[in-house]
Image (cartoon, rainbow, N blue to C red):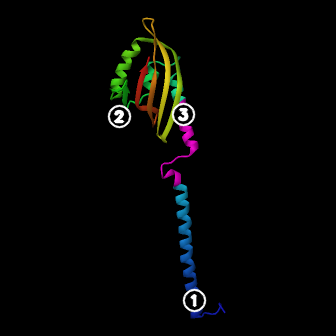
Amino acid sequence: MFYKYDGLTNNLLIKTLEKMNKHLISFIAIISLTLLITSCRTSCTGEMSDKKREMIKSEIETIVKNFFNPKTLNYSTHTGLRADKEGYVFGLEGKIGFTSYASYNEQMKINFAGIQRFTEASIVSMYVYVLSENAATCTTEFKSKYLTVKGDTIPNNGCWTAVFKKFDNGWKVIQENATHIK
């Protein structure tokens, strides 16, 4: 019966195929939209996986632990942790101490000229909070001592909060605040 050309059968077949096509297109559109929404759920909203968050937290903890190593803590490691970028700010002892990396760096040259070396440096406690894939905060309570060029041992204890930003050359402190205690 379908082998014979029949205008009525042909029209019915065409209409049936058109309806199936419409439903198929709707079905494909719904499946595609569902896949897009599902795959975009974490990446498009700015959320990140727990695994990525833990990886960033671990990176920051390692950087801070390495920073507080008395064998390597010196002018270069101290200034190298900071971002030489616009927006760098250092709050110090309850006031804004430096509003540029250049002014901070100049003061560190003066400070470290009077230091022979750090004799002790340790982290009492540390808390890292990951803000995004390119930003994290870290608050530490630390204890340290350094030996001056005159031979005096000076305690250098306090609390430090830093905002780390990921640049092309790695994680750097872009803003920070420190308070020293005796």
Q: What residue do we see at 54% from left, 64% from top?
A: 32
**Highlighted magenta segment, given as a residue range:** 41-61
Identify residue for label 1. Answer: 12
Residue 172 in the figure: left or right of residue 6: left
Q: Secondary structure at mark 3?
A: helix
Who comes first in sequence, dot 1 or dot 2?
1
- Of the numbered discs in the image, which one, if any, rests on residue 95? none
Residue 175 in the image: state x and y as whole percent: 40, 32
Disc number lying in front (1 or 3)? 3
Disc 3 residue type (three-letter): Glu
Disc 1 residue type (three-letter): Leu
Toward which corner of the image does residue 50 lie, by quadrant?
A: top right
Residue 79 in the image: state x and y as whole percent: 42, 24
Q: What residue do we see at 52% from left, 51% from top?
A: 42
Q: Secondary structure at mark 1?
A: helix
Pick the front one: 89 or 26: 89
Residue 51: in magenta span: yes
Identify residue for label 3. Answer: 59
Disc number lying in front (1 or 2)? 2
| Magenta stretch, main secondary structure class | helix
Quadrant (top left/top right/bottom left/bottom right) for the N terminus: bottom right
Q: Residues within 10 Å of mark 2 (few under 14, many from 20)?
A: few
C-alpha span from label 3 to label 2: 23 Å
Residue 52 in the image: state x and y as whole percent: 56, 42
Who comes first in sequence, dot 1 or dot 3?
1
Who comes first in sequence, dot 3 or dot 2?
3
Residue 89 in the figure: left or right of residue 56: left
Q: What residue do we see at 45% from left, 25% from top?
A: 159
Disc 2 residue type (three-letter): Gly
